[in-house]
């Protein structure tokens, strides 16, 4: 799979550790965001770019890390059609795919260590969306998103 891996400066070390790990799992990694630990990078732009590239089918999935994982989850989820899941355990990461067809996994580098992060990434990348009852629920989310987008002018 083509994986977009992005971080801000708060999660640079985790991103660098995950990059090699994901490659060792057999995936192509496309690096987004912070290129060294000293350069400050705003996480929304990184999250938006990964999400847009998924939307445009340039990537299969994304993995985003910042201090808590919350900011990148919120930002990536603003791109229409993108479902981002904040996961700090393997069960949630697996269910993000199997139940929610989440294209983006987010984690917090200041919340968990690199070894748990590797196991979470592995669980996420080894899981796939089976459809079934979950497809109906994901469609409900997508349909409501479209409804909100159509009426966005009246919401502002």
Image (spheres, rainbow, N blue to C red):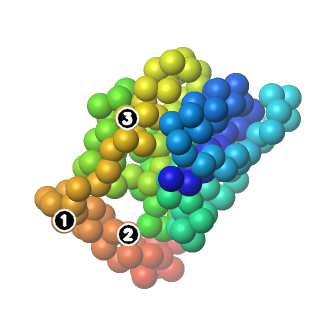
Whether pointer 3 and pointer 1 mark residues with C-beta atoms closer than 8 Å, the reply is: no
Foreground residue among 62 and 150 = 62
Give the distance between the C-alpha atoms of the residues marked 1 and 2, in whole angstroms: 14 Å
Q: Residues within 10 Å of mark 3 (few under 14, many from 20)?
A: many
Name the residue rendered at 19%, 65% in the picture: 136
Residue 45, image x and y in percent? 70, 53
**Residue 67 at least partly seen:** no
Q: Is residue 146 above or below residue 129?
A: below
Mark 1 residue element: helix
The residue under label 2 is 145
Mark 2 residue element: helix
Name the residue rendered at 51%, 36% in the picture: 25
Q: Earlier in the sequence, mark 3 or mark 2?
A: 3
Q: Residues within 10 Å of mark 2 (few under 14, many from 20)?
A: some
The residue under label 1 is 136
Foreground residue among 146 and 21 = 21
Give the distance between the C-alpha atoms of the residues marked 3 and 2, in whole angstroms: 28 Å
Mark 3 residue element: helix
**Quarter-of-image position of residue 18:** top right
Residue 103, image x and y in percent? 44, 54
Whether pointer 1 and pointer 2 mark residues with C-beta atoms closer than 8 Å, the reply is: no
Q: Residue lying farthest right?
A: 38
Q: Nearer the viewer, mark 3 or mark 1?
A: 3
The residue under label 3 is 123
Name the residue rendered at 44%, 67% in the picture: 81
Q: Nearer the viewer, mark 3 or mark 2?
A: 3
- In this picture, residue 41 sits left or right of residue 107: right
């Amino acid at each position: 799979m083509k994986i977009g891996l992005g971080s801000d400066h708060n999660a640079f070390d985790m991103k660098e550790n995950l990059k090699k790990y994901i490659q060792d799992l057999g995936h192509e990694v496309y690096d987004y965001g912070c290129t060294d630990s000293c350069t400050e990078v705003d996480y929304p732009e990184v999250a938006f770019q990964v999400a847009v590239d998924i939307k445009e089918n340039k990537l299969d999935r994304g993995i985003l890390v910042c201090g808590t994982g919350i900011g990148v989850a919120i930002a990536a989820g603003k791109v229409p059609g993108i479902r981002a899941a904040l996961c700090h355990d393997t069960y949630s990461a697996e269910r993000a795919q199997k139940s929610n067809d989440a294209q983006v996994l987010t984690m917090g580098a200041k919340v968990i260590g690199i070894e748990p992060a590797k196991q979470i990434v592995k669980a996420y990348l080894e899981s796939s969306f089976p459809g079934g009852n979950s497809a109906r629920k994901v469609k409900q989310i997508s349909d409501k998103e479209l409804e909100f987008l159509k009426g966005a002018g009246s919401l502002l």
